Image (cartoon, grey):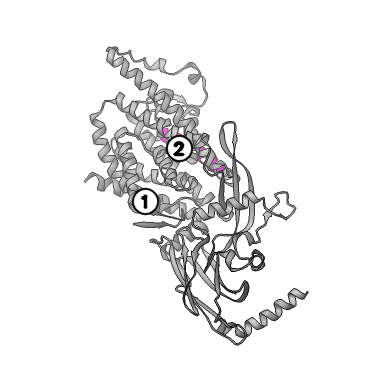
Amino acid sequence: MPLYLPIAELSMNVFVVLGMGAIVGFLSGIFGVGGGFLMTPLLIFAGVPPTVAVATQSNQITAASVSGALAHWRRQGVDVKMGFVLIIGGAVGAFVGAQVFTYLRLLGQVDLMISIAYVLFLGSVGGLMLWESLRAIMRQRRGVEPPRKPREERHKAWIHALPFKMRFRKSHLYISALLPLAVGFFVGLLSAIMGVGGGFVMIPAMIYLLGMRANVVVGTSLFQIIFVTALTTIFHSVNTQTVDIFLALLLLPGAVIGAQLGARIGLKLKAEQLRALLALMVLLVCVKMGLGLVVEPYERYSVAEVTQLEGIK
Amino acid sequence: MMRKALLMISMVIGFANAANALVTDLSNRRIEIRYSFNGADLILFGAVGATSINTYNDAYDVVIVVRGPEAPTIVRHKERVGGIWVNTNAIRFPAAPGYYAVAASRPLEEIATPVAFASYGIGFKNLPLVADSGTGRGLTVPPIAFRDALFRLRASEGLYRQEIDSVSVVDEGLFRTDIHLPANVPIGNFIVETFVFQKGSMKARHRINMHVDKEGFERAAYTFAHEWPFFYGLVAVIVALGAGWLAGILGKK
């Protein structure tokens, strides 16, 4: 059943879109990740213009994060103060990212930037994750459990030397506000140029860099993601009019149902194995994107209508 | 001067019998893009009548040209830079048709000489395409590789069609053809021009207009997104929050 998407200006099969939502939802449910980094490339591979894929995905992530954030909110799993500091950083990052996105789109280089960003981030995050999870699996086989470092040693000396210290009670932290601001900024930047929530960067940063208490990490990151992707949606709407709300809504039901099924299966797998599998999947997307950059294209020319680019006024 | 005069005379004669020499019409002159739009097929039919000046008792040929709205268009070229493929140079066409189709009753080279087609601007090669020089010094002739690429890319999207569709002559004075509009057809005014050739020379032409536009909800959404982008973004966020919340509740059950 074809459906004409008025903003993307193309016709897509409804069941293909629903199916893509379900597949990505299922995988994100298994691994407990947002899935933006899978959905945006999948949309691009399916023929959606990369600019529309990125901008629409921000909108879809807002929708997909609501119920999770509410659940964490109810069980006091959100550090609101930390969340707002992250959001301020995220807002600036998303704004800068959207400006860069708009500028490169005019130059005809935005598709290249999206691909390079994906290859770099998925490559490094996937590589680190794979290495870390393989090490954990090996350790488990040998039966050695490394002792967890005491809290005081988790932060490096330079982190304590930073100014503008703030107390985050829920996270059990007393650290410089610059650190969460920087993390938020970086995540906002990624959100605007890659169409991701940024959880795959933010959660490790919260745990390893900020040293937040584990039970507020996921809730606080979802809290930040909702606000930052909402802002990104508005920035992209204003700058490039590439947010297709219908595509975003179509992806949602499959994503929600798929995520519920995936979460059940995810519970049956071991954490280290899950992380290794996730790492492999991340690397697979990375390689696919990377091949697009280095393999000689079948068609070296491309065509774009300028009125669509110059609707930026 | 001589040519101009001849053209004038032929036009007057043409007009004199245009009414009964050639008439065409479309099955639909207003194409509406709605949610289920997946391209459209139109039927163009026409009739040539016999006159005392030009008898159509002899065999004749029909060439139909459909031209969509013109828009500034950029064609970019990729080159390998440091191992990866990057758009390096681009040519801007200030007015390239968003849709262009030529249908004929026989292969074009059998109907008339290339010169004849060139004088009426029939065929992609004969489109008066110019390019921005990029230095602010006005317009130049576009490099042939970029021109070819424009045709190739648009043809692969089904937007440029030449030597694909044929005009079938139903009866002595009656002919018809199908016009195929793909799902990604641009919106705006289209010109459908029909030429009748006989023994290599143009005998009659007839032009009708057609309009493609988004309608209903599709139109409203597109207009909203482009005219009030901030509020569109705001609505998109509110809808996403509501839908996400609802989906969460329904998903639990």
Q: Quadrant of residue A128?
A: top left
> Quadrant where the C terminus of chain A lies?
bottom right
Q: Which residues are magenta?
A: A82-99
Q: Residue at x 54, y 82 (%)?
A: B57
Residue furthest left in the image: B253
Instruction: Give the foreground label among 2 and 1.
Output: 1
Residue A304 sits above or below residue B49 on the image: above
Q: Residue at x 38, y 61 (%)?
A: B36
Residue A178 percent across, percent down from the top left: 50, 28
The answer to whether residue A88 of the structure is visible from this angle is no
| Spatial CA span between label 2 and label 1 | 24 Å
- Residue position for label 2: A87
Prevailing secondary structure of the magenta residues: helix
Q: Quadrant of residue A285?
A: top left
Residue B217 sits above or below residue A25 on the image: below
Q: Chain of mark 1?
A: A
Q: Is residue B2 magenta?
A: no
